[in-house]
C-alpha cells in the first residue's frame, strides 16, 4: 500500500505528452462502449496501485469538482 496521504495535483509525469499519446493510441479503433470500459479498467488498476483510501477519496472529489472546467 502506498503510504502517501495527499493527492498530487501538480504535474508529476515524466514525458507527459508521450503518456497522453499512448493513452490516445490505446483507444484507437474502439467503440465508445469499449473505450469507456478501457477507461474504467484503467481507473481500477491505478486505484489498486495507489491503494490509499484517503488519496482515492481526494481524487474522486477533485475529479467531481473538475467536471465544470
Image (tube, helix red, strand yellow):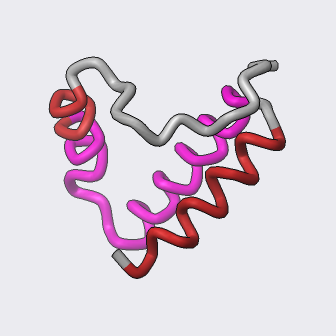
**In the displayed structure, would residue 18 be above or below residue 47?**
above
Quarter containing the N terminus: top right
Residue 11, by quadrant, is top left
Q: Nearer the viewer, residue 59 or 25?
A: 59
Quarter containing the C terminus: bottom left
Residue shown at the point (35%, 72%) measured from the top left: 32
Q: Nearer the viewer, residue 26 or 9?
A: 9
**In the displayed structure, would residue 21 be above or below residue 32?**
above
The magenta span reads: 22-50
Residue at the limit of the structure toward the bottom, as seen here: 68
The mark tally for this picture is 0
Image spot of residue 17 (x, y percent): 16, 33
Image spot of residue 55 (x, y percent): 72, 40
Residue shown at the point (30%, 59%) measured from the top left: 30
Q: Main secondary structure of the magenta part?
A: helix
- 50 left or right of 20 in image: right
Residue shown at the point (48%, 54%) measured from the top left: 39
Residue 1 magenta: no
Residue shown at the point (63%, 36%) measured from the top left: 45
- 28 left or right of 37 in image: left
- 56 left or right of 65 in image: right
Residue 43 magenta: yes
Image spot of residue 44 (x, y percent): 66, 45
Residue 15, by quadrant, is top left
Image spot of residue 56 (x, y percent): 72, 46
**In the displayed structure, would residue 58 be above or below residue 22?**
below
Q: Nearer the viewer, residue 59 or 27?
A: 59
Amino acid at each position: 500500500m502506498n503510504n502517501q496521504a495527499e493527492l498530487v495535483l501538480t504535474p508529476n509525469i515524466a514525458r507527459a505528452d508521450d503518456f497522453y499519446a499512448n493513452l490516445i493510441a490505446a483507444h484507437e479503433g474502439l467503440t465508445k462502449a469499449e473505450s469507456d470500459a478501457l477507461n474504467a479498467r484503467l481507473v481500477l488498476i491505478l486505484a489498486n496501485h495507489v491503494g490509499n483510501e484517503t488519496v482515492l477519496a481526494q481524487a474522486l472529489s477533485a475529479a467531481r469538482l473538475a467536471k465544470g472546467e
